[in-house]
Image (cartoon, rainbow, N blue to C red):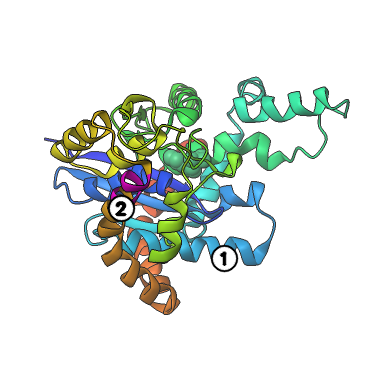
Amino acid sequence: MKKRTVLTGITTTGTPHLGNYVGAIKPCIEASHDEDVQSYYFLADFHSLVKNQDPERLRQSTLEIAATWLALGLDTRRAVFYRQSDVPEIAELTWILTCSTAKGLMNRAHAYKASVQENVDAGEDPDFAITMGLFSYPILMAADILMFNSTHVPVGKDQVQHLEMARDIAQRFNHHYGEIFALPEAVVDEHVAVLPGKDGRKMSKSYNNTIPLWLTEKQLRKAIMRIVTNSLEPGEPKDPETSALYAVYAAFASPQQRASMREAYRNGIAWGEAKQQTFELINRELAPGRERYDALVAEPRLIEETLCEGAERARAFATPFLARIREAVGIRSLV
Ligand code: TRP
């Protein structure tokens, strides 16, 4: 059986939060142990440059995200774990793909269109503060994916359009230059929980309702105590299906734990008690990683070495593959 090639990128903006952990980090790390999969996970620092032009923040976020994945047990012997900018072949492929990508395709990108719409609504020039980086973002992402002949790309729903664009770009290239690229598929896991944030809406940086992953035990407890609940008193039955607190609990719980917590809700558990149990469950899961994380962040050299090794392995595939692509488009030796 041909191995599947699974690839996904993590934009290096901000600090990882519980929503990232449940929605992406944990499932990817679990998949990294699967023998039938060749996985590539990378820090998309070129992508983050589109939004983040603060050099120190970019570095800090790269450090924190890399430390997080390593602390949580990513199998870096099996999975290839690297920083996008350490693989110059990706940037070169981006240009090659840019030259055969229709501008009209990019005009349709949701993120770009939303920025234009915001400008129009605000009475600004439609192009106000829109960079070519934002406009061409999907081409860089296509290069990330096509560079490794990825077949399966786990992403959130918001990235599905980018995957369709990567397929379009690959197909157009293949049609013109011959069968070079595998056609990638988005993998959107409907079972992975979308974690609500402290206010009950989806946990997201843009809503400012996140719970950072690496709080101290005390801070984590405090953050969980702040998750919104309603005014039902202890002893009054509570509905787990509409409770953000229950959804957070469920994302970390086993099926048995979920069943007994639902039972406790119906039997009128006090919100304070439900919060305490939620805190304990999450803290138990994160405590061992927290220690490793603190040790790694204090020793960035180890992370740097791991990323450099990852880039070497990534380039072992990318360098010869890019040579084929150059050959195909006519960037060739004259003799
Ligand atoms: N755009 C993705 C996001 O914001 C991150 C990303 C960059 C990515 N390159 C990728 C995801 C390649 C999957 C494959 O989440």
Asked if 144 appears above or below 59 in the picture, the reply is above
> Residue 9 location, x and y as percent?
43, 46
The residue labelled by disc 1 is: 59
Q: Residue at x 76, y 27 (%)?
A: 118
- Camera-side residue of 311 and 209: 209
- The answer, for residue 120, to whether it is visible in the render is yes
Asked if 162 appears above or below 312 in the picture, the reply is above
Which region is colored magenta? 272-277
Horizontal arrangement in the rendering, residue 204 relative to residue 195 (left or right):
right
Residue 67 in the magenta stretch? The answer is no
User: Looking at the picture, which amino acid does disc 1 mark?
Assistant: Arg
User: Looking at the picture, which amino acid does disc 2 mark?
Assistant: Ile
Disc 2 is placed on an element classified as helix
The residue labelled by disc 2 is: 282
User: How many C-alpha atoms fall within 10 Å of the one at disc 1: few (<14), some, or many (≥20)?
Assistant: few
- Camera-side residue of 231 and 72: 231
User: How many C-alpha atoms fall within 10 Å of the one at disc 2: few (<14), some, or many (≥20)?
Assistant: many
> Residue 241 location, x and y as percent?
33, 25
